[in-house]
Image (cartoon, rainbow, N blue to C red):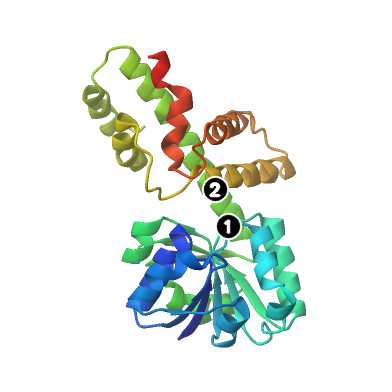
């Protein structure tokens, strides 16, 4: 299948590598050309413009950072005229209202649109084990399911456009909340002189356990947040989207507001581009130990 991929950041690069490895004809584009160099070395065709990438494809995967970036790329005058007759598959994390608005504008230009945000990061993308949530029609799900199953075995139709965006926000706020809670528990254990492995031994055998705790523990113990799978800056963006969705749904979000404050403090400390587990530095700063 001829596929265009717009946005080759951390997740975008992993998705691109997977599609290339599974035999799809892929053309990628990113506004920062240096983020496409590794893909070029793998033999992926790199287009200098989004319009050129789209012109060579039947489906266009969006792995851009936010709705503003999507609009800047997709609805640029040179790009928008290429959308007619093509299907746009939005795979990043944006708000449900933003997704429906982009759908309206794509449709007005003669294109088709569905959303397919994913849970997972670089390793899962490369292995084809992402969890894929689809917002669209049953017909779109049936048509594009084979392509999406190149990226993950668990591909599920959530409902119309906007529903998958809601599910993705619900999942990502769990990421933020669990990370903040685990960091505080670890800080209490370490400062209280309790052996971390004893603590983890209990957690692992309990209903409290989440695999993320195991994955992030080495980073927290070493205070090493380099080579992120998901940055602090991007998690803050998703938390703010979740807070907006919670307000629209008339839900209390006091707990998540606290996590938002931690993320802002972490970014202000110069840790916006590293792994989001760096919020540990605000919860248990080394100077205060």
Percent of width and height locating residue 260 = 59, 34
Percent of width and height locating residue 32 = 54, 64
Q: In the drawing, does residue 73 fall left or right of residue 197? A: right
User: Dot 2 lies on which element?
Assistant: helix
Return the residue nearer the eye: 132 or 19.
Answer: 19
Q: Give the answer, above or below, for where 135 lies relative to 66.
A: below
At 60% across and 57% down in the image, what residue appears? 165
Q: Tag 2 or tag 1, which sits nearer the N-term?
A: 1
What residue is disc 2 on?
Answer: 234
- Residue 237 appears in the picture as rendered: yes
Which residue appears farthest toward the front when viewing the image? 34
Percent of width and height locating residue 238 = 58, 47
Q: How packed is label 1: few (under 14 Cα within 10 Å), some, or many (20 or more)?
A: some
Percent of width and height locating residue 227 = 37, 48
Q: Give the answer, above or below, for where 210 lies relative to 227.
A: above
Is disc 1 in contact with disc 2, using a CB cutoff of under 8 Å?
A: yes
């Amino acid at each position: 299948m001829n596929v265009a991929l717009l946005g080759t950041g951390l997740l975008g690069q992993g998705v691109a590598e997977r599609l290339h490895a599974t035999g799809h004809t892929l053309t990628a584009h990113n506004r920062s050309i240096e983020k496409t160099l590794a893909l070029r070395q793998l033999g992926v065709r790199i287009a200098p413009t989004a319009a050129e990438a789209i012109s060579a494809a039947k489906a266009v995967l969006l792995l851009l950072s936010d709705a503003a970036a999507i609009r800047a790329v997709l609805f640029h005058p040179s790009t928008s005229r290429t959308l007619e007759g093509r299907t746009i598959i939005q795979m990043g994390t944006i708000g449900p209202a933003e997704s429906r608005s982009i759908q309206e504008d794509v449709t007005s230009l003669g294109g088709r649109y569905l959303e397919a945000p994913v849970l997972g990061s670089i390793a899962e993308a490369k292995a084809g084990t992402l969890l894929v949530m689809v917002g669209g029609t049953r017909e779109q799900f049936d048509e594009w399911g084979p392509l999406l199953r190149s990226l993950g075995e668990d591909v599920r139709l959530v409902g119309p456009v906007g529903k998958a965006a809601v599910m993705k926000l619900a999942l990502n706020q769990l990421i933020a909340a669990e990370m903040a809670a685990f960091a505080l528990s670890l800080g209490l254990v370490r400062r209280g002189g309790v052996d971390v492995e004893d603590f983890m031994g209990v957690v692992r055998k309990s209903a409290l356990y989440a695999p993320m705790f195991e994955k992030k523990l080495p980073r927290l113990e070493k205070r090493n947040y380099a080579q992120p799978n998901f940055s602090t800056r991007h998690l803050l963006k998703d938390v703010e989207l979740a807070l907006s969705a919670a307000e629209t749904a008339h839900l209390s979000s006091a707990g998540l507001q606290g996590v938002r404050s931690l993320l802002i403090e972490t970014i202000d400390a110069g840790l916006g581009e590293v792994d989001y587990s760096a919020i540990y530095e605000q919860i248990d700063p080394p100077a205060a130990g």
